[in-house]
Amino acid sequence: MKNANRSFWLMLVCLVATPVGAAEDLIGLYLTWRGDPTTTMTVNWVDIYEYSGDGVYFRAVRDDDRDEAWQHVEAAESTVGPTTLQLRRAELAGLEPGTLYEFCVGEKPDDAAHIWRFKTMPAKLDQPISFVAGGDMMHNRAMMDAMNAQMQKLNPDFAVLMGDLAYANDVVGSRWIDWLQSWKEYAVGDGKRLTPMVLAIGNHEVKKGYDGKIPEDAEYFYSLFSLPSDRSYFALDFGDYLSWIILDSGHTHDVAGKQTRWLQAALAERCDQQFLFAGYHFPAYGTTKAPKDGLPIDSPRAKAIQENWSPLFERYGVTAAFENDHHTFKRSHRLRGRQRDDENGILYLGDGAWGVVPREVPSPEVGWWLAKAESRNHLWHAELRPDGTATLEAVDPSGEKFDSVTLSAPRTKPVESAPAG
Ligand SMILES: [Fe+2]
């Protein structure tokens, strides 16, 4: 008994004495971007202890094994939503594009086991890059782990996660702990390189339902993720080859009005990008949640997106729009003005089934807008190539690639009509 007591206290002392930099004790460790993905990186960590290290040590990893001096950036201190969970965030800037860095949180690294890595995105698309995209991630931990494990095998450069992440409804903090732990375990690619994430908000990030909500109703989401422009709709530009436009499909900002006006300006500014993707939670061309006597594409929220955003996607020629929320797999026909138009239409890819129980899909006779739909968990995996072509594949939790679309020609840049007069 005496020995058992001694073992307990010895174990406790060891736990407390473990440097924060070990990171294995942290609840969460994740990378996001507030700024340019080619020259910045935000390192975030979540801990139960108030003393959780005051910053990040980092340095570039050189091919010739030359050791760079460690640099240090202090972390901002806050908490996760209304909880006492400690959140730390270090903004690293002035980095070199396309460069591998190693870093450690808390203590100055004295052991390779405490060191993690990240890679900045390249300034030019001179070799293929890849990302994964999806949403509706965690009905339960096992389902999220299974899809995350496939993501890990794909070793993407980054992940775009579009809402209904932890299903915490801005209330159940413990679900965020599970979500963060799963991400920390699996969002680790080759050589302990962490996978940065880009985030969109969904209805399950918000208290009590869909309509009339504001950012204060999504306290966990807004505290966990430092978003570009401090808003749930923003643009992220990767050199001159890629832009992501992330939108809030009416969860804390209205679809119409200010957000749509911003979208028009944001797309107009990015006409020359080689790849231009839009991503958001609720679908314009969904697969389930049909209103009474209607189709999924007839719901008021779907119509608001079709009327406000789709004409802009068409006008500025977005490469594809990623949609979620309906817990199915779908690839739309190319659509324009709510019609099939395989020449000039927009491709809508979804429908949010990362780690949730999939729903039934409409029959082909009913779902005229769907080129393919299945009741199946998946993520989208995209490879973008320097010649402007791309392959987008749907991958299920067993690793099977069950759908693929190849963009065999570079994106056609929209032709703006000449100003009147
Ligand atoms: Fe949703």
Image (cartoon, rainbow, N blue to C red):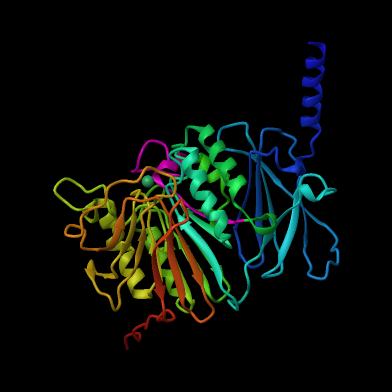
Question: Which residue is rendered at x = 43% and y = 71% of the image?
Answer: 267
In depth, the one of 68 and 83 nearer the eye is 68
Q: Is residue 69 magenta?
A: no
**Residue 54 position in % (x across, y down):** 76, 44
Q: Residue furthest bottom?
A: 421
**Residue 305 position in % (x across, y down):** 31, 59
Q: Is residue 217 magenta?
A: yes
Q: Quadrant of the C terminus?
A: bottom left
Q: Residue furthest top?
A: 1
Which span is picked out in magenta?
195-218
Q: Is residue 395 above or below residue 76?
A: below
Q: Is residue 245 above or below residue 289?
A: below
> Which quarter of the figure has residue 123?
bottom right
**Residue 113 position in % (x across, y down):** 77, 48
Q: How many marks?
A: 0
Asked if one can make out residue 269 in the rendered structure from this viewpoint, the answer is no
> Which quarter of the figure has residue 342?
bottom left
Question: Which residue is rendered at x = 28% and y = 55% of the image?
Answer: 302
Asked if one can make out residue 372 in the rendered structure from this viewpoint, the answer is yes
Q: Quadrant of the N terminus?
A: top right
Relative side of 383 to 85, left or right: left
Q: Residue furthest left?
A: 293
In depth, the one of 297 and 111 nearer the eye is 111
Question: Which residue is rendered at x = 75% and y = 43% of the image?
Answer: 22
**Residue 231 position in % (x across, y down):** 50, 53
Q: Is residue 314 above or below residue 21?
A: below
Q: Is residue 122 above or below residue 22?
A: below
